[in-house]
Amino acid sequence: MPIDLDSAEETFTTATDLTVGLEEEFAILDPVTLDLVPRFEELRDAAAADPVLHEQITGELISSEIEIISGRGEDLSDALARQRDARRRLFALCAGRGVALGATGTHPWADYREQQNIDTEHYRRVVEGLGYVARRNNTFSLHVHVGVRDLDRAVRACDRLRPVLPILLAAGASSPFLEGQDTRLASARTQTFTKSFPRCGVPDAYGGWAAFRAYLELLIRTRSLVEYTQVWWSVRPHLTFGTVEVRICDAQITAAESEGLASLIVACVAQAVRDGDDGVPFTDPAPRLVEENMWRATRHGLDGRMIDLDRGEEVSTRAALEALWTWTAPVRDELRIEPGPGGPNGAQRQRAALEGGTDLRDVYASTVRETATTYAQEVPAA
């Protein structure tokens, strides 16, 4: 679709603060071998028998991947209820068709050269335009949308979220394995996708819509973009939905981890908007410093240390994560958002199992069982 920046301004003018949308990506697996299998189109067509589910699933870059979307929830609770229902329906559909689903940021041993790309105009354009970079990107993630009225407020919130992105990445890192080996990274997905795609990772600080619009107009004028979704920044205003979209996190092994991380992201966006509205002082950190923390999060996840960019000192990544909960306390109290799970993240649990002597394939099998057990649960009673 052509990029209509004037229409985007109108979308944000009428947007509602703090609506929430959730997007979760899953690997489609053979239930016995746990290899990736290209069965998205089959699942999509089968979902036509369930009109609710059919509206909530979509394809991604490869045919062995499926995404479920909550649609617009009026708040976090509403979005979670919608997503739980979509998960239950999806897992029931997959179980009936002999398909398993995985929820780590990467598949531990799949060969990207054997994967089929989905046949849509958008993804044909991605593959033709990016070549190896796109073909190599067999990754799975969690995206969270939060409604923000007015594009200036949305862009300024994205600015304030830049130094937060590495902490969110570390909190949810779940992809230590790739191509049959322990990469020694906490998030191999980040290295594969965020460090390879253009216009990806941590964006510049723009200060407001005027500067961001000028950036987009230049890319459009120079034929760098033909659609806005080619802007893959890890936080961005979504011009179609009127939201701030946070795209930094790996897919999460369990439903509790996914919901806890999504809740933290919603709180961070809400607090960033609130701070901007209240004129809370903020200095945009240099990109090179945010990137230093991005590398630390990619490499070490929650086992590492971060640079406190305000004090210029090292702190444990756990302490940095706790500081996020402290920062967001005002809006969490108002929105009734509780802190998420405080235990080891997916990368830590997988690596601990491997180092304890469990075969890599058995480690992944364990995560697939966790995913099936937790995501397929019935919607909790109100």
Image (cartoon, rainbow, N blue to C red):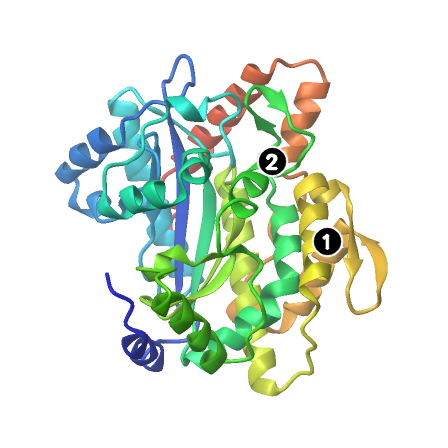
Residue 67 left/right relative to 191: left
Residue 8 image point, x, y percent:
32, 74
Residue 68 image point, x, y percent:
33, 45
Residue sitting farthest toward the front:
222
Q: Nearer the viewer, residue 247 or 219?
A: 219
Q: Nearer the viewer, residue 83 or 199?
A: 199
- Identify which residue is drawn at 36% across, 18% down: 30
Q: Which residue is mark 1?
A: 292
Residue 243 image point, x, y percent:
40, 68
Q: Which residue is mark 2?
A: 346
- Identify which residue is drawn at 31% across, 60% down: 227
Q: How many marks?
A: 2
Q: Residues within 10 Å of mark 2 (few under 14, many from 20)?
A: many
Residue 115 position by quadrant: top left
Residue sitting farthest toward the left:
49
- Give SS at disc 1: helix
* Circle 2: residue type: Gly
Residue 175 position by quadrant: top right
Q: Residues within 10 Å of mark 1 (few under 14, many from 20)?
A: some
* Circle 1: residue type: Glu
Q: Nearer the viewer, residue 137 or 174?
A: 137
- Identify which residue is drawn at 28% across, 38% down: 89
Viewer-nearest of labels 2 and 1?
1
Q: Quadrant of the C terminus?
A: bottom left
- Of the numbered discs 2 and 1, the one sitting upstream in the chain is 1
- Identify which residue is drawn at 38% across, 73% down: 217
Residue 93 image point, x, y percent:
25, 31
Q: In the displayed structure, would residue 222 be above or below residue 127?
A: below
Residue 359 left/right relative to 305: left
Q: In the displayed structure, would residue 354 be above or below residue 23?
A: above
